[in-house]
């Protein structure tokens, strides 16, 4: 539920946002030239109503603002999810909002639903949070009416912790949201999932990052 929300730098991103690579995806920082593609993909009520703060309709100005904040506000760690040819298929991010633990969120453009992209991107984000940044736990949320997102979290090892009412900007109201947590110990035991190539992570500036995984 945190996508496009404020993210604390010291808790989720280092000085430079890395590029996270998986089998099929490249997670990279948004750039100015992405605004139109992001707008076209995200401007759908089915996406906005399942996230906390994505507005609907989502305008080009919203995309430009999101991209600008991603670079100006170093508390944010926002990635676009792209294919190998740089086609944008979605977005994801992480950071702290209202709780002490970092929280992740994600969205996938509707033409790309059902291909496992959200799960693959979330796992890369999780590996970055635990392996690269050394967090001990991560939180996430999914509206109770959003079984696909709950399933993504379950496939990543998240454990259900309860339900809270959360403000949803696109519906101008609050809705019940299932809350989930993933601890470092469980993540370490799940590392055999093997879908995320941590060693291929590289910095935005092109320099190769050291291995991210501590354990
Ligand atoms: C939730 C969302 C990110 C999923 O993206 P995705 O790339 O299609 O997800 P994946 O393909 O990785 O996994 C989806 C899983 O949910 C399952 N699923 C999809 N619709 C479902 C439904 N109605 N009921 C139960 N399970 C469902 C899929 O079968 C799949 O599980 P499986 O691999 O066990 O078969 C996407 O639908 C989306 O962007 N929704 C709007 C924004 C949002 O909800 N963001 C999350 C909150 S931050």
Image (tube, helix red, strand yellow):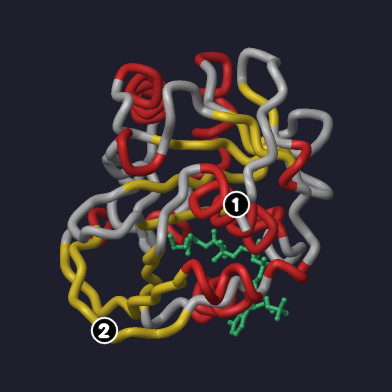
Circle 2 packing at 10 Å, graded few (<14), some (14-19), many (20+), is: some
Residue at image position (29%, 24%) is: 73
Q: Is 209 in front, or is 54? A: 209
Image coordinates of residue 68 in percent, x first then y, are 37, 19
Residue at image position (65%, 63%) is: 119
Alpha-carbon distance for marks 2 and 1?
32 Å
Question: What residue is disc 1 on?
Answer: 214
User: Could you tell which of marks 2 and 1 lies nearer the N-terminus?
Assistant: 2
Mark 2 falls on what kind of element?
Answer: strand
Circle 1 packing at 10 Å, graded few (<14), some (14-19), many (20+), is: few
- Give left or right: position of 200 versus 63: right
- Give left or right: position of 35 versus 48: right
> Does residue 137 appear in the picture of this structure?
yes
Question: What residue is disc 2 on?
Answer: 163
Height in image: 107 above or below 21? Answer: below
Q: Nearer the viewer, mark 2 or mark 1?
A: 1
Q: Is 13 in front, or is 135? A: 135
How many marks the image carries: the answer is 2
Q: Which quadrant holds the C terminus?
A: bottom right
Q: Are marks 2 and 1 in contact (CB under 8 Å)?
A: no
């Amino acid at each position: 539920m945190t996508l496009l929300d404020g993210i604390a730098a010291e808790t989720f991103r280092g000085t430079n946002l890395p590029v996270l690579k998986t089998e099929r995806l490249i997670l990279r920082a948004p750039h100015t030239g992405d605004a139109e593609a992001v707008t076209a993909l995200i401007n759908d009520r089915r996406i906005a109503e399942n996230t906390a703060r994505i507005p609907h309709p989502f305008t080009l100005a919203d995309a430009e603002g999101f991209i600008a904040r991603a670079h100006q506000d170093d508390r944010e760690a926002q990635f676009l999810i792209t294919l190998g040819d740089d086609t944008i298929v979605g977005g994801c991010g992480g950071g702290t909002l209202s709780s002490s633990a970092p929280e992740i969120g994600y969205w996938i453009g509707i033409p790309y639903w059902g291909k496992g992209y959200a799960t693959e991107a979330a796992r890369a984000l999780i590996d970055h949070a635990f392996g690269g940044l050394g967090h001990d736990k991560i939180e996430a949320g999914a509206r109770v009416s959003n079984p696909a997102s709950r399933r993504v979290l379950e496939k990543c090892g998240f454990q259900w912790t309860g339900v809270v009412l959360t403000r949803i900007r696109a519906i101008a109201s609050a809705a019940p949201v299932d809350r989930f947590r993933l601890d470092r110990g469980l993540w370490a035991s799940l590392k055999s999932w093997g879908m995320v190539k941590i060693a291929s992570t590289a910095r935005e500036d092109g320099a190769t990052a050291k291995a991210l995984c501590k354990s």
